[in-house]
């Protein structure tokens, strides 16, 4: 594992624990009844040189009920985690699930870590990472139930960013490397609101690349194929398995949700990289998608090992526009803001449709290039304004998650939940902010006695 410096919150924590009665400061809204689940890398054993991205998944659950708060964390007990736990040491090394040379006899587990996202759909709580099937989790205890393949109706990689249609309840998903490591094959499928697989097919992309997120509107699905390329030849020769090759160009495949993958239309754009999509919608014969766009990807080098430019490896909110009339095969890219950040979120009731409110975690106002996320930006499209909340110097936070006040509340009427690392105290708070008044700061802080390491994504599941 790459060693974090003393100012970071990347190092794993060594324990699982339960905190049934957490102290709160401020007015914890009594309307917040449910659980915020978060997921992120937390290696069970140190692997020298391994990327932070590939650490074992650890789930963190903050349960809120009638103004009270509790906490629980558990590792996701994937086949990899169990094999290493039994062996008492690391057995897998980095990307691709590579194994150590002296594997114990009889170990057949793969290198899955289930460390990127956690979603609730069709009665199942699912821990996700993009190289393996979903891992089902028991919502209360966080016990691992095992891989979920929907009655063997799906197979292969499953995205960490499936999209749930707020009208129909359908979940749509994709997978890359669908025919094996570093292949250009993508998969696409759908799960009904009742949790039944209704569709699964595969198709070929222009080249092999890392496709972390995709785009879904009411009537279309878009597949970004961007030049963070994958190469088996590089991997076996000890060079970077994933690397930045901008000369390959940027492609986005557009498919009608009711159509088939054979009918995908490919659009071209300027080379860039996107880990995360805020939202997308249709307007007549045009599709708009708001994404967090990098000029060059962070964390991954050029094929020869040279690092990308840190000044270009910062994401900004950017609008992609697609003209479906057939007059052009190019899509346009226009930055909407200069405030760098990541982890965009919306009121999920507007997913795939025109929206007003969005939020993302932002870098510190001093513009430091260390990548630390130290604030939140609120984008109000109707009022054409930005608001921001910034943490005290040295602190950092996780992806903000929106929770509506109730099912009938107007878009944006509710709260943002984010986990904050207090650097001076080396512990974490759960911060609750009024979603449309973030500049006022948290209305409540739930105090945790230890820290929650930096992670990736989370979601709110309301009480039944």
Image: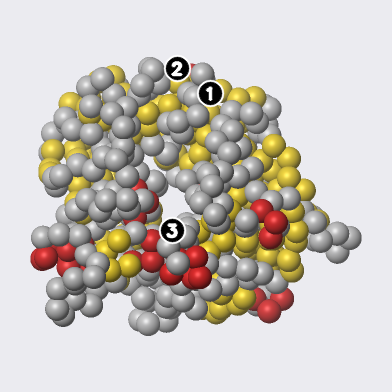
Label 1 sits on residue: 367
The disc, 3 or 2, on the residue closer to the chain's N-terminal end is 3
CA distance for labels 1 and 2: 22 Å
Query: Of helix, strand and loop, which one carries label 3?
Result: loop
Is 437 positioned to the left or the right of 75 in the image? Answer: right
Decide: is 225 above or below 387: below
156 with respect to 202 (left or right): left
Q: Which residue does the numbered mark 3 point to in the structure image?
A: 160
Q: Is residue 310 above or below residue 223?
A: above
Can the viewer see residue 239 in this picture? yes
Near mark 1 (Cα within 10 A), the count class, few <14, some 14-19 or many ≥20, is few
Q: Nearer the viewer, mark 3 or mark 2?
A: 3
Is there a contact, CB below 8 Å, between mark 1 and mark 2?
no
Select label 3 or label 1 by which is in front: 1
Residue 262, compared with residue 327, is above or below; it is: below
- Left/right of residue 327 with respect to residue 353 in the rendered view: right
Q: CA distance from mark 3 to mark 2?
A: 32 Å
Q: Secondary structure at mark 1?
A: loop
- Name the residue located 71 percent from the left edge and 76 percent from the top edge: 263
Q: Which residue is mark 2?
A: 440
Q: Position of residue 142 (x, y in %)?
A: 20, 55
Compare marks 3 and 1 and give the one earlier in the sequence.
Answer: 3
């Amino acid at each position: 594992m790459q060693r974090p410096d003393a100012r970071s919150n990347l190092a794993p924590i060594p324990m699982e624990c339960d905190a049934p009665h957490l102290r709160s400061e401020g007015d914890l809204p009594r309307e917040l009844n449910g659980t915020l689940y978060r997921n992120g890398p937390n290696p069970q054993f140190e692997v020298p040189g391994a990327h932070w991205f590939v650490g074992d998944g650890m789930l963190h659950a903050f349960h809120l009920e009638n103004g009270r708060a509790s906490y629980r964390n558990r590792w996701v007990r994937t086949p990899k985690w169990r094999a290493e736990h039994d062996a008492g040491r690391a057995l897998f090394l980095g990307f691709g699930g590579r194994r150590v040379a002296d594997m114990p006899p009889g170990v057949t587990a793969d290198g899955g870590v289930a460390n990127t996202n956690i979603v609730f759909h069709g009665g199942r709580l699912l821990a996700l990472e993009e190289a393996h099937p979903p891992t089902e989790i028991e919502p209360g205890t966080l016990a691992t139930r095992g891989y979920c393949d929907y009655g063997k109706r799906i197979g292969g990689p499953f995205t960490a960013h499936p999209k749930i249609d707020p009208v129909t309840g359908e979940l749509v998903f994709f997978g890359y490397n669908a025919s094996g490591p570093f292949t250009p094959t993508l998969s696409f499928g759908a799960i009904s609101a009742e949790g039944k697989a209704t569709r699964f097919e595969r198709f070929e992309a222009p080249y092999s690349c890392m496709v972390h997120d995709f785009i879904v509107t009411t009537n279309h699905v878009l597949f970004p194929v961007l030049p963070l390329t994958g190469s088996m030849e590089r991997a076996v020769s000890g060079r970077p398995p994933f690397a930045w090759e901008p000369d390959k160009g940027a492609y986005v495949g557009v498919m009608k949700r009711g159509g088939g993958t054979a009918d995908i239309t490919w659009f071209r754009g300027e080379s860039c990289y996107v880990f995360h999509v805020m939202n997308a919608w249709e307007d007549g014969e045009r599709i708009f998608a708001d994404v967090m766009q990098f000029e060059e990807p962070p964390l991954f080098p050029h094929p020869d090992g040279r690092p990308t430019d840190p000044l270009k490896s910062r994401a900004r909110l950017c609008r992609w526009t697609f003209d479906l009339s057939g007059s052009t095969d190019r899509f346009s890219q226009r930055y909407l803001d200069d405030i760098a950040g990541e982890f965009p979120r919306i009121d999920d009731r507007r997913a795939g449709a025109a929206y007003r409110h969005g939020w993302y975690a932002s870098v510190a106002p001093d513009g430091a290039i260390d990548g630390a996320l130290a604030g939140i930006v609120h984008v109000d499209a109707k009022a054409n304004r930005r608001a921001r909340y910034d943490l005290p110097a040295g602190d950092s936070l996780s992806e903000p998650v929106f929770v509506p006040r109730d099912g009938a509340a107007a878009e944006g009427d509710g709260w943002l939940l984010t986990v904050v690392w207090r650097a001076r105290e080396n512990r974490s708070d759960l911060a609750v902010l009024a979603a449309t008044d973030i500049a006022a700061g948290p209305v409540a802080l739930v105090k945790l006695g230890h820290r929650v390491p930096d992670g990736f994504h989370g979601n709110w599941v309301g009480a039944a």
